[in-house]
């Protein structure tokens, strides 16, 4: 169940690909640096994570399709206004309810800022809710041999 919950949390964290169901400002394919800060409650526990991911539009669409077709999850609100994409989801999985609301701001085709808030009932790993703030920056072409969707 923990792997499932980690996947659900990741899916709700507003990746660039989440906006493919609605035409959004274009982003470049290639290597992206993703810096994320999370704040878990109760207690305001902060953590930071930095990763690099090779992206192409096909892998982004595939990830978005998985999120949209996740059993037990429904999209309750979705919109695009200018360069700001908003998404709200409700999931009921394995006795847990997860509600998520977030926005992704496409600052350019090489910079994306996302903010999301997720609540868990009952608490997951002692947390009742989590806020995530992510800044994503295009770095250039993916290194030779690095396949889209692969995180480093």
Image (cartoon, grey):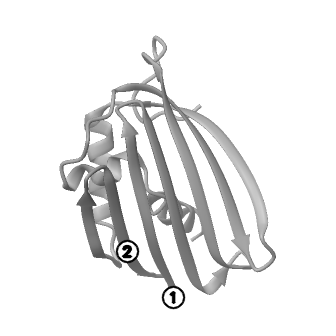
| Marks 2, 1: nearer the viewer | 2
For disc 1, the marked residue is 95
Say above or below: 62 vs 152: below
Decide which of tag 2 and tag 1 comes sooner along the chain.
2
For disc 2, the marked residue is 89
Residue at 26% across, 41% down: 25
Q: CA distance from mark 2 to mark 1?
A: 16 Å
- Position of the N terminus, as image quadrant, is bottom right
Q: Secondary structure at mark 1?
A: loop
The front one of 74 and 26 is 26
How many other residues sit within 10 Å of disc 2, few (<14), some (14-19) or many (≥20)?
some
Q: State if disc 1 and disc 2 touch (CB < 8 Å).
A: no
The front one of 93 and 76 is 76
Left or right: residue 22 compared with residue 2: left
The front one of 90 and 8 is 90
Q: Quadrant of residue 93?
A: bottom left
What is the residue that sits farthest to the front in this orientation?
82
How many other residues sit within 10 Å of disc 1, few (<14), some (14-19) or many (≥20)?
few
Disc assigned to residue 110: none
Residue 42 image point, x, y percent: 76, 80
Q: How many marks?
A: 2
Left or right: residue 55 compared with residue 143: left
Residue 148 image point, x, y percent: 39, 30
Residue at 28% across, 46% down: 62
Q: Secondary structure at mark 2?
A: strand
């Amino acid at each position: 169940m923990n792997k499932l919950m980690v996947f659900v949390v990741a899916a709700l964290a507003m990746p660039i690909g989440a906006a493919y169901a609605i035409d959004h400002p274009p982003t470049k394919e290639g290597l992206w640096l993703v810096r994320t800060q999370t704040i878990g409650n109760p207690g305001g526990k902060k953590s930071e994570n930095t990763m690099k991911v090779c992206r192409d539009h096909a892998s982004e669409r595939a990830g978005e399709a998985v999120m949209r077709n996740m059993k037990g999850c429904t999209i309750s609100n979705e919109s695009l206004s200018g360069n700001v994409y908003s998404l709200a989801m409700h999931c009921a999985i394995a006795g847990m309810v997860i509600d998520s609301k977030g926005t992704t701001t496409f600052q350019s085709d090489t910079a994306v800022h996302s903010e999301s808030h997720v609540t868990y009932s009952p608490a997951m790993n002692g947390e009742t809710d989590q806020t995530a703030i992510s800044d994503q920056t295009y770095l250039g072409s993916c290194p030779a041999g690095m396949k889209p969707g692969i995180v480093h």
